Amino acid sequence: MNGLPRSMLFACTRNAVRSPMAEALARRWLGARTVIDSAGVEPGLLNPFAVAVMDEIGLDIRDHRARSFVDLAGCSFDVVVALSESAHLEAKAFAAASTVTVEYWNVADPTLNEGSREQRLLAFRSVRSELEARICERFPM
């Protein structure tokens, strides 16, 4: 699919880090031109490090509530961007009976990084930067 989709879904494993970050970044860059949502394979609790690094760039994701693909049954999207292997498998099943485009962006899970608070924040910042760059490259304004 070329150009801006009318609707898109970002998906990761828990809908607690990568996909809510991507959703907020995409909303910043694409605005009202595209309906943007996010989901996970198994919803989890929003990660406080994700909240912190998004706050650093003026995006508040505190009100995000994790949802699953099941919660979105009956919804349709032009593009689903999977950010983890498990979400990619789930996205393909979700899109099987439709014309949705499924893309897989292999984005590292920053929660797997250990170390000091600053080291962990660096990992989350790195993911934030990667997501923003990929969104801007894939969906140019």
Image (cartoon, helix red, strand yellow):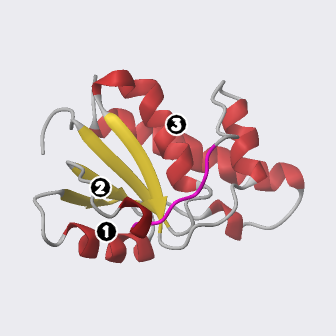
Q: Tell me the CA gap for discs 1 and 2.
A: 7 Å
- Mark 1, residue position: 91
Could you say where residue 2 lies in the image, as x and y percent from the top left?
Answer: 12, 39
Q: Are marks 1 and 2 in contact (CB under 8 Å)?
A: yes
- Mark 3, residue position: 24
- Callout 2: SS: strand
- Callout 1: SS: helix
| Numbered badge on residue 80 | 2
Could you say where residue 3 lies in the image, as x and y percent from the top left?
Answer: 16, 33
Q: Are marks 3 and 1 in contact (CB under 8 Å)?
A: no
The stretch in magenta equals: 64-69
Q: Name the residue: 73% across, 66% down.
A: 113
Q: Name the residue: 57% across, 43% down.
A: 128
| Picture layout, residue 43 above or below residue 52 | below
Q: Is residue 103 left or right of 101 when viewed as pictured?
A: right
**Residue positioned most to the right:** 116
